[in-house]
Amino acid sequence: MICPLFILAGVFTRIACLPIIGVLLVAMVFVHPDWSIAEGQFGWLLLIIFTTLAITGPGRWRVGAAPQQRIRYGAG
C-alpha cells in the first residue's frame, strides 16, 4: 500500500518498485506458470512497466526536485 504512494510522489521510486516486482514475479512464475501469454498479459505488462521504472527512476517531476529554469529561445 505504501509503495505505490512512494512511486506516485517520486520518492524512493527505485526502491519502492522492488517489492512490486517481486510479488509480480512470484505470481507469474510460481503461482500461475500454466497461464498463456494471453491469460497473463496484464501481469507481464505490469512487470515490464515496474522494471522499466526501477531502471529509469522517477524523472524530472517528483517531490523535492529543484525547480527547473525556463529555457528562453531567441533574442531576449
Image: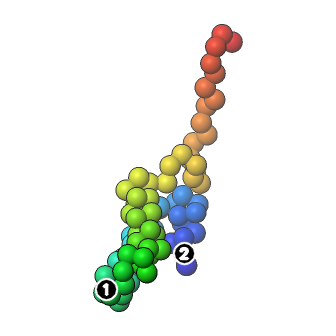
Dot 1 alpha-carbon crowd within 10 angstroms: few under 14, some 14 to 19, many 20 or more: few
Residue at the extreme right of the image, as rendered: 76
* Residue situated furthest top in the rendering: 75
Q: How is the image coloured?
A: rainbow
Q: Is residue 17 visible?
A: no
Q: Secondary structure at mark 1?
A: loop
Amino acid type of the residue that numbered disc 1 sits on in the rendered structure: Pro
Q: Is residue 37 above or below residue 34?
A: above
Of residues 66 and 51, the one nearer the viewer is 51
Q: Quadrant of the C terminus?
A: top right
Please tell me which residue lies in front, 55 or 38: 38
- On screen, residue 62 above or below 72: below
| 59 or 11, nearer to the observer | 59
Helix, strand or loop at mark 2: helix
Residue at image coords 32%, 87%: 34
Q: Quickly name the residue at label 2.
A: 2
- Check disc 2 and give the amino acid type: Ile
Q: Which residue is mark 1?
A: 33
Q: How many marks?
A: 2
